[in-house]
Amino acid sequence: MIDLHTHTTASDGTDSPFTLVKKALATGVKTLGITDHDSTAGWSEAISAMQPQIELVLGAEISCLTDDGISVHMLGLLFDGENFGMQEMLAQSRDTRLPRMRKMVALLQADGFDITLDDVYQAAPDQATIGRPHLADALVNKKIVASRDEAFSELLHNESKYYVTHAAPTPIEAIKTIKSAGGVAVIAHPFASRRGQILTADTFQELVTAGLDGIEVHHRDQNDSERSVLTSIARELHLAITGSSDYHGTGKLNALAENTTDPTEWEALESRANARRVVKL
Ligand code: AMP
Ligand code: ZN
Ligand code: FE
Ligand code: FE
């Protein structure tokens, strides 16, 4: 099984990279993508947990904003982890998440919620890319809400008065940076409408012009009709089709390998990287 999109404690997942690789082995995943938000901090620990039965596709999920303010997630896979432009883009994104979190906490405090920035840091593992899930965990620790899910549905969703965006590259900038670093770019859950406004079908062409390689079609946040529209777009634009779990440990319901990528699609996608970077023992 091929699962190309998962998270660890290097961002907002709850399993360490080591544990994730062990769980993937136990689940029968043969090709595992590790795609923490705006970070490659989990890569080396993941490699240390490898066995001959599993290969790793190292990557990152890059938070992007279109010029119209639409949030887009771009998976960069198989890029050179030492590429300066790539690491600079990831670092900028992580840096702007701190003032953003400070603003969200201040908005909550102004409405009387007993929460501090320190509470959020305490809820986040060392090295983690700080995000709303850590704020959610802090709100759970303070017994303000019962779960991450409740925190999102009540207080932290994209339309909430407490939501603040952080500076982020545009999807086109992210694609270009991923491609300059030799990797492949796959747009993550583009029609996941529950999260807010989504791209329209006609914007995919300009992403392809920038170098887009694939579309994540099979994802729990996209229903059958959305998947079918995305499949047609991918076929028409000669893009690879992926499926993945977007596993976050206990942070979300998503089970490892609940959606997977067809081996033929994976082969086509992998061949578009500028070097063979799948990590095998
Ligand atoms: P951020 O990058 O800080 O804006 O936070 C976005 C993250 O929140 C994404 O990784 C999502 O997976 C996560 N997320 C969104 N909705 C929920 C939810 N209802 N429960 C748990 N995590 C969520
Ligand atoms: Zn996440
Ligand atoms: Fe995402
Ligand atoms: Fe994700």
Image: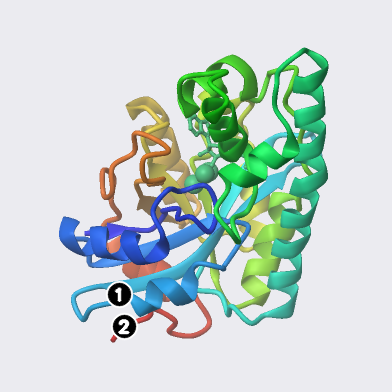
* Residue on which disc 1 sits: 55
* Residue on which disc 2 sits: 280
Of the numbered discs 1 and 2, the one sitting upstream in the chain is 1
Residue 141: x and y in percent read 53, 30
- Residue 76 in view in this figure: no
Residue drawn 74% across the image and 74% down it: 85
Report how far apart the C-alphas of labels 1 and 2 lie in the structure: 5 Å
Q: Quadrant of the N terminus?
A: bottom left
Horizontal relation, residue 2 to residue 67: left or right? left
Task: Specify whether tag 2 is near ligand 4 (CB below 8 Å).
Answer: no
> 67 or 229, which lies in front?
67
Horizontal relation, residue 13 to residue 68: left or right? left
| Whether residue 49 is situated above or below residue 105 in the rendered picture | below
Residue 270: x and y in percent read 41, 72
Residue 94: x and y in percent read 72, 55
Residue drawn 58% across the image and 52% down it: 74
- Density class for disc 1 (Cα within 10 Å; few <14, some 14-19, many ≥20) is many
- Density class for disc 2 (Cα within 10 Å; few <14, some 14-19, many ≥20) is some
Q: Quadrant of the C terminus?
A: bottom left
Q: Amino acid at mark 1?
A: Glu
How is the protein colored in the picture?
Answer: rainbow
